[in-house]
Image: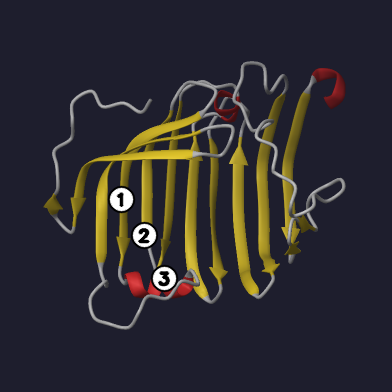
Amino acid sequence: MPLLSRTIVIDEFVLVDPTIRLEQRGSRNNWSLGPGTPDTEPVPSSGGFVRRPGALPFDASLGDIQIENGAISYASGTDRREVNGLDLNIRMPGLDQPLDVTGELTADGENMTLSLHLGSVRSFFEGEAVAARLDLGGNLIDLGFNGNILEGEDLRYSGRFSTDIPSIRALADFAGSPLPPGEGLENFQLSGVLFGVRTPYLSTRLILAAMTISGLTIWPEPAGLACH
């Protein structure tokens, strides 16, 4: 029995036409459990996500997991965002084996593709070093990261990073922050070695070395650079 053997096995699971509606009203939303928090009450500064040994004391296997034609909407005041045509395929033979997620979607009218690879889910949650790869593609942006999640409680990562933005103005419009009228700020390419850390308190620090912008090297990659 799965509960006694601490093993979860899902050979096939297909979710067709799911719809998720998310709504934020001040500090209250429709996806958190428990009572809401008044807007004036400070947010607690502890209890964040921590990677630690023994975090996943069981095994799991995901065979053919699919989401077909999913829809997600988000509303907060006058801000509205919609994701439609969400198709996802998830495969994970075991917690100690690679997790692969591939899919495509339409976000506010823009078609996008995504691909995620994680060397081991257990290693990720238990604070071990693990290979990681992320690719996001579309008309607005092509973004890629190929590297490693580093050992430790915090979410530290390093690897090769690249992005190609055909039009910064179009991307800013899509993000809801249009730029002032004018020329320029169109095609933008950036690549380099990315080092980053995300702490349990959701602060983030990024370092981009060996940076190249549209083929122009800004500074050489420093030897032995690490994220602390």
In what quadrant of the picture does the N terminus appear?
A: top right
The reply to whether residue 9 is in sight is yes
Residue at the extreme bottom = 181
Q: Which residue is mark 2?
A: 142
Contact, mark 2 vs mark 1 (Cβ under 8 Å): yes
Looking at the picture, how far across and down is residue 55, in whole percent? 67, 22
Q: Amino acid at mark 1?
A: Ser
Looking at the picture, how far across and down is residue 74, in whole percent? 68, 66
Q: CA distance from mark 3 to mark 2?
A: 15 Å
Q: Secondary structure at mark 2?
A: strand
**How crowded is the residue under tag 2: few (<14 C-alpha within 10 Å), some, or many (20+)?**
some
Q: Residue at x 67, y 62 (%)?
A: 68
Q: Secondary structure at mark 3?
A: helix
Quarter assignment of residue 125: top right
Residue placed most toward the observer, 169 or 166:
169
Contact, mark 3 vs mark 2 (Cβ under 8 Å): no
Q: Residue at x 67, y 38 (%)?
A: 62
Looking at the picture, how far across and down is residue 170, in whole percent? 38, 75
* 181, above or below 124, in the image: below
Q: Which residue is mark 1?
A: 162
Q: Residue at x 25, y 69 (%)?
A: 187
The mark closer to the camera, 3 or 2, is: 3
Q: CA distance from mark 2 to mark 1?
A: 8 Å
* 65, above or below 75, in the image: above
Q: Residue at x 63, y 71 (%)?
A: 82
Does label 2 or label 1 sit earlier along the sequence? 2
